[in-house]
Image (cartoon, rainbow, N blue to C red):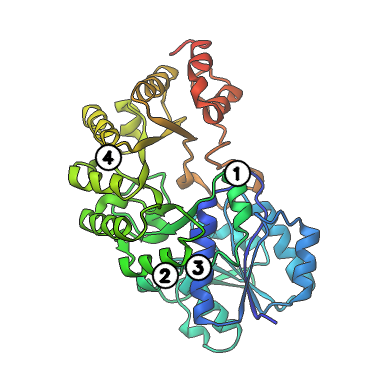
Amino acid sequence: MKKFLLLWNNTFTSRHINYHFTQFGEIYDYLNKKLPDEVDLIDADMENLDLTNLTKKLLYNEYKSIAMYITTENLRNSIAVVEMVKAINKNTKIIAYGPLPVLIPEFFLKTEIDALFKDGDQEIAILNFFKYCDEKIEENQLSGITLIKNKKFQSTYKGEFIDINELGFSNLKLLPIEEYSKAKNKRRIIITISRGCPYKCPHCLVQIIEGQKDRRRNIESLKKYLIEIYSEYKYVKFFSPDFTLNQEYVIELCKVIKDNFPLLRWECTTRINFLDNENMLRLMSESGCTQITLGIESISKKDLEYIKKVQDINILKQTIERIQKYNIKVKGCIMIGIPGQTKKSLFETYDYLTKLNVDIRPTIYTPYQNLESHMDIEMIENYNRKLYNIEIGDLEYSDLLKLVFFPNSYKDILENNDKK
């Protein structure tokens, strides 16, 4: 019987498959190596386990401690599961990690959760909490978490960052990979390349969760993992806030892929200002890079000023064309609903990128920094990048959602409205 459980509860709205690998599979692998044969995992979201079926699993194995990944999309179901866990065994200790425990810790004082991730790397905070619940370490040895006792917070030491080369790799035999593939309609594996970002975008959670320093895996460890999965998986997303921030690293990785994994196809996400190296782009293409995702957000100077992003439209165009020169597809992430944004500026962004053959991926501007602990679950659930309800002039919410889910129809949607 396993002592501990890493749990991802059913999602109420959209699923972010990337995080099922990075915030779940990789963290599990780290914990399992530190506590061999003691940690279980259940991805109730991707396995479509309702509360009844999840309860059966929980009854089968009464865990000493459970770590739950909690975000806006699964908050409601997570609270229900917490209540069920405590009904089964009130001595089971629960730690919540993910964005919400960091953003609105006071909210969880109203729940039966015992601890919250606070800072540092999440896996080491969870590891120490598991050890604490197993009476292997004392309370004064805890770090990176906030304990909740008698509806009051009790602080621990500042969180620690792990050696990035100890970061886990998703065990594809234990995760419901086929369900991940169905959700995205592609057989793709996500691998964390780096953590941390030096940029302070007010709407982004990366720096809050991962810190400011760019920390990268050793390429040899990546090579070893790719060897393990290469026979079965040929499509990878390298997960990094700023993949090409370290261009020497990217060039070395490309050479390793080109020499050892000729059929591998991969994609990444990076910033516009780190793509001026033609030799790097050529090597990326030759090593199988098929797509680069850019955080473009908008081409409106006013929109960009609001989110504190500096971007020259001429450099943007040159960068997109430079990427496409090497037969790499460009995906552009844009934001709908930036405060003060107009239908005219929104139309111009869609139209400009469409004419440059950019694959547009819209999300709704979601100001996580405005979340407050007094909000109820329904209000918190609204903070969803696909469904957030925000006004753009007299654009109806239904049309806003159409712009998110059917971006190629932007002309029909926006031209039927006055572009003001």
CA gap between label 1 and label 2 equals: 26 Å
Dot 1: element = loop
First in sequence: mark 1 vs mark 2: 1
CA gap between label 4 and label 2 equals: 27 Å
- Asked whether disc 1 touches disc 2, contact meaning CB atoms under 8 Å apart, the reply is no
Any part of residue 350 in sight? yes
First in sequence: mark 4 vs mark 2: 2
User: Pointer 2: what residue?
Assistant: 167
CA gap between label 3 and label 2 equals: 7 Å
Q: Quarter-wise, where is residue 260 in the image? A: bottom left
First in sequence: mark 3 vs mark 2: 3
User: Pointer 4: what residue?
Assistant: 272
Kind of residue sitting beneath label 4:
Ile
Any part of residue 100 in sight? no
User: Pointer 1: what residue?
Assistant: 14
Kind of residue sitting beneath label 3:
Ile
First in sequence: mark 4 vs mark 3: 3
Kind of residue sitting beneath label 1:
Ser
Q: In this view, does 4 lie to the left or right of 302?
A: right
Give percent across and percent down for residue 239: 41, 54
Q: Quadrant of the C terminus?
A: top left
Kind of residue sitting beneath label 2:
Leu
Q: Residue 27 carries which label?
A: 3
CA gap between label 1 and label 3 equals: 21 Å
Residue located at (46% from left, 84% from top): 141
CA gap between label 4 and label 3 equals: 30 Å
Crowd band around label 4 with a 10 angstrom C-alpha radius: few (<14), some (14–19), many (20+): many
Give percent across and percent down for residue 417: 51, 12
